[in-house]
Amino acid sequence: MSENRGAWPLYEVFVRGRRGLNHVHVGSLRAADRRMALTHARDLYTRRNEGVSIWVVRAEDIGASAPDEKDPFFEPSADKVYRHPTFYDIPEDVPHI
């Protein structure tokens, strides 16, 4: 019998400490469903009223680039000159572009 058979899925937990701040990854937990994951995340990661918002995401649903792929992964964006407003005429009354 497999060790993980019947194990609850792994959730990644993100907490926003105060209004206006970003959600920050604070840890992981296992839960039967999303609702249980939120409840456990609240109990584990915001015990002292540190958070105003919690996100839980199944770990298997997260996709991310690898740090060692940084240069090749982001390099193609430099080829798209339309993303860089270097050839547009900027009106004088438009600050900070």
Image (spheres, helix red, strand yellow):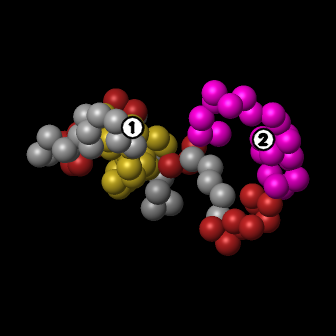
Which of 32 and 19 lies nearest the eye of the viewer? 19
**Which range is magenta?**
76-97
- Point 29% across, 34% down: residue: 19
In which quadrant of the rendered image does the C terminus lie?
top right
Tag 1 residue: 55
Left or right: 1 with respect to 43? right
Residue 87 forms part of the magenta stretch: yes
- Residue 83 visible, this angle: no
Tag 2 residue: 85
- Point 48% across, 52% down: residue: 5
Which of 44 and 23 lies nearest the eye of the viewer? 23
Residue 48 forms part of the magenta stretch: no
Disc 1 marks which amino acid?
Trp
- Residue 45 visible, this angle: yes
Q: Name the residue furthest bottom.
A: 68
**Which marked residue is nearer to the observer: mark 1 or mark 2?**
2
